[in-house]
Image (cartoon, rainbow, N blue to C red):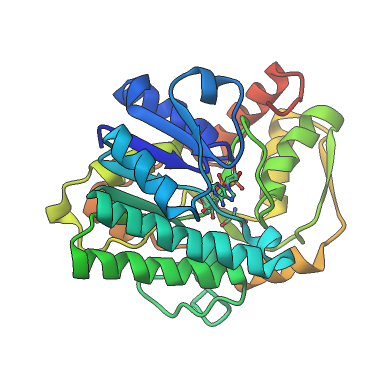
């Protein structure tokens, strides 16, 4: 991974992955793209271009002119937003991703696809969900993730494209707000803790989902894309997680840093139903074995860092 094109780079992951890659490989070697013009570090820290991933010709031309060897394809709509606009979610998440994969084939690049815990459904074993198991998701977002996991494997087998993917859990970060997912509460809670000392959760107590701090997610993307292909038994996509938590567990970790912090509940039926259809906890042994996945942050260390960073920005989102 030496010359990289990143799609959807203005989102929660891309806004941190692009600067991370620019530090690793050099600013001029990472082309950030998104639908709309970027401002701030994304645009000022290195090359940026507007790109709708559904436009295959424009996409191919950018990758060719940049002489990219890797496409990291982050553009997409998250789970709750997808349920509110199914046609758009299908168009961007499936048609747009299939276009991106075809560009990678034509231009001879490696391809990274971010799958999700959403690739599982209610019939999947809920605890220590295996790497390979039943995948019958009940959201349009999850259906798209399964389709792309399979398509990425197909492109590897049929055309030799170096496709690799991660099933991200909910990602917790303090740079860019999450873009309409079910796990968003696990970010909002930290902002509200700093601003108000209390939080009203749209996810019910006792609802466990996998989560991970953004720093570990960035390391995981680089670790997987740099991994020796001879060690990879799996490709699309690896279970990864750093913790399995419910809102009470996060609230209790925050309470140790902000005494008196309280949590209340006003459950959103849409996002609660999605959360209940996902696993409680993933088995990440394949990622550990095949490319040494090892997250550094647990709930306590992540909580301290989230609260420190948000407080240092006066509780404001970037
Ligand atoms: P986000 O919603 O924060 O950002 C997505 C970006 O995609 C936005 O900047 C948006 O402008 C862009 N985009 C939307 N439609 C586009 C189009 N047609 N062409 C080009 N760009 C377009 O998402 P994120 O949280 O950064 O997630 C990135 C990827 O990782 C997504 O595929 C998501 O499903 C996956 N993922 C994220 C999480 C998480 O917790 N953040 C967890 C699992 C998987
Ligand atoms: C969402 O909640 O939609 C995402 C995800 C886990 O895929 N954060």
Which picture quadrant has residue 2? Answer: top left
66 to 125, vertically: above or below: above
Task: Determine if residue 62 is in view.
Answer: yes
Which residue occupies the foreground of this view, 227 or 309?
227
Q: Residue at x 42, y 27 (%)?
A: 20
Which picture quadrant has residue 196? Answer: top right
* Percent position of residue 5, x then y: 38, 38
* Percent position of residue 208, x then y: 62, 61
Relative to residue 301, is residue 59 drawn left or right? left
Which residue occupies the foreground of this view, 219 or 146?
146
The C terminus, quarter of image: top right
Count of picture labels: 0
Task: Determine if residue 131 is in view.
Answer: no
Relative to residue 132, is residue 143 drawn left or right? right
Q: Residue at x 32, y 47 (%)?
A: 293
284 to 297, vertically: above or below: below
The N terminus, quarter of image: top left
Q: Residue at x 68, y 42 (%)?
A: 187
Relative to residue 250, is residue 290 drawn left or right? left
* Percent position of residue 56, x then y: 42, 54
* Percent position of residue 144, x then y: 51, 68
199 to 144, vertically: above or below: above
Q: Residue at x 63, y 23 (%)?
A: 309
Which residue occupies the foreground of this view, 106 or 194?
106
Relative to residue 217, is residue 299 drawn left or right? right
């Amino acid at each position: 991974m030496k010359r990289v094109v990143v799609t959807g780079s203005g989102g929660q992951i891309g806004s941190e992955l692009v600067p991370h890659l620019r530090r690793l490989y050099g600013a001029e070697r990472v082309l950030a793209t998104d639908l709309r013009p970027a401002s701030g570090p994304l645009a000022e820290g290195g090359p940026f271009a507007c790109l709708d991933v559904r436009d295959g010709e424009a996409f191919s031309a950018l990758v060719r002119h940049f002489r990219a060897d890797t496409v990291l394809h982050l553009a997409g709509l998250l789970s709750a937003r997808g349920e509110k606009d199914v046609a758009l979610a299908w168009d961007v998440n499936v048609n747009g991703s299939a276009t991106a994969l075809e560009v990678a084939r034509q231009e001879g690049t490696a391809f990274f696809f971010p799958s999700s815990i959403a690739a599982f459904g209610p019939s999947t074993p809920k605890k220590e969900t295996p790497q390979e198991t039943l995948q019958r998701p009940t959201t349009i977002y999850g259906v798209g993730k399964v389709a792309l996991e399979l398509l990425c494997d197909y492109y590897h087998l049929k055309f030799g494209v170096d496709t690799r993917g991660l099933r991200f859990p909910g990602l917790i970060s303090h740079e860019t707000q999450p873009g309409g997912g079910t796990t968003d509460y696990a970010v909002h809670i930290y902002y509200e803790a700093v601003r108000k000392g209390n939080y009203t959760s749209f996810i019910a107590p006792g609802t466990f989902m996998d989560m991970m701090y953004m720093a570990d997610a960035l390391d995981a993307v680089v670790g997987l894309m740099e991994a020796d292909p001879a060690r990879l038994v799996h490709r699309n996509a690896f279970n990864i997680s750093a913790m399995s938590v419910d809102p009470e567990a996060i609230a209790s970790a925050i309470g140790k840093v902000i005494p008196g912090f309280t949590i209340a509940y006003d459950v959103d039926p849409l996002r609660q139903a999605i959360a209940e259809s996902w696993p409680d906890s993933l088995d990440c042994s394949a990622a550990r074995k095949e490319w040494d996945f090892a997250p550094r942050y647990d709930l306590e260390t992540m909580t301290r860092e989230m609260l420190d960073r948000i407080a240092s920005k006066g509780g404001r989102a970037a």
